[in-house]
Image: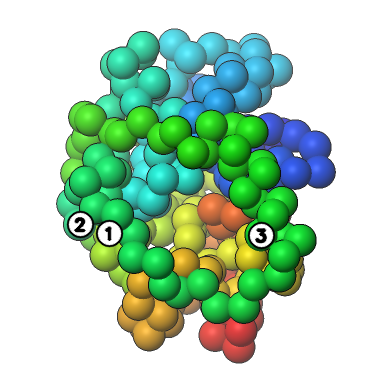
Amino acid sequence: MQIAAGLHRIGSGPHSSIVNSYLVVTADGITVVDAGLPRYGRLLEQELASIGRSLDDISALVLTHGDSDHIGFASWLHHEHGIRAHVHESDVERARLEVKKPNRGWGRVKVGPLAGFLWYSARNGGFRIPPVTEVVTVADGDVLDVPGSPRIVHVPGHTPGSVAVHVPSVDALFLGDAMTTRNVLTGAEGPKPAPFTLDPAQARESLDRIEAVDATWVLPGHGPAWDGGVPEAVRLIREG
């Protein structure tokens, strides 16, 4: 699904934004941001085919953090096509599934949205996540030499190694679970704090690191793309 010129989200249909994986498409190649769920591999191939590209055009995979619903096809992409995942050093063990996320930070829960999230995850291989085995570590302030020249902004809180990924060429900031535009536990829409956040206070402090980013598109790990700009998104998240 095309969001804007050079900017795509894999998958289509009413449930496609429950878990997000994005493509930055340039003349020099493609950077994937987050690997969603394991069965997203076929959705990735479909999205590439729809724009006349293939897996051979992928140059990089950047993970916003190491949670299981963001690493889904990372192992497959590496083993089949040699693409290693870029991940912050503080989330490497998480991406390797050597660290299990504590059962906290849920907040309010509504049965319908939670059941929908679990059903969708199960259908797409979310209960059998392969670990990421080969990584390239990134740090705050890095500008990666991959298509789109993404800049890494460390935004700890949801996890210790959560990052935002700023790609000026597509006017976008990818935020992973530093925010959500549709809470998978309540169905609440619009920019808000994400559930399952390990350190909510630290996550709010991390908003200071992105509020001046000049980007129209605010792209979360869960929920639809939002085009109201980063400063307004940060304001709404703080209010949430």
- Between disc 1 and disc 2, whose residue precedes? 2
Q: Nearer the viewer, mark 3 or mark 1?
A: 3
Which residue: 60% across, 88% down?
239
Quarter of the picture holding the C terminus: bottom right
- Judge left or right: residue 42 versus residue 225: left
Q: Position of residue 184 (x, y in %)?
A: 64, 60
**Callout 3 crowding tier (Cα within 10 Å): few <14, some 14–19, many ≥20:** some
Q: Are marks 3 and 1 in contact (CB under 8 Å)?
A: no
What amino acid is at disc 1? Answer: Gly
Check disc 3 and report the residue beneath it.
Answer: 114
Check disc 1 and report the residue beneath it.
Answer: 161
Which residue: 71% across, 41% down?
16
- Between disc 3 and disc 2, whose residue precedes? 2
Secondary structure beneath dot 2 equals: helix
Check disc 2 and report the residue beneath it.
Answer: 90
Q: Are marks 1 and 2 in contact (CB under 8 Å)?
A: yes
Q: Position of residue 166 (x, y in %)?
A: 43, 54
**In front of the other: 8 or 129:** 129
Quarter of the picture holding the N terminus: top right
Q: Where is residue 211 in the image (x, y as percent from the top left)?
A: 47, 76
What amino acid is at disc 2? Answer: Ser
**Callout 1 crowding tier (Cα within 10 Å): few <14, some 14–19, many ≥20:** many
Q: Nearer the viewer, mark 3 or mark 2?
A: 3
In space, the residues marked 1 and 2 are separated at their CA atoms by 4 Å
Classify 9 as above or below 163.
above
Residue 149: mark:
none
What amino acid is at disc 3? Answer: Leu
Classify 214 as above or below 64.
below
What scheme was used to colour the molecule?
rainbow
Which residue: 38% across, 85% down?
201
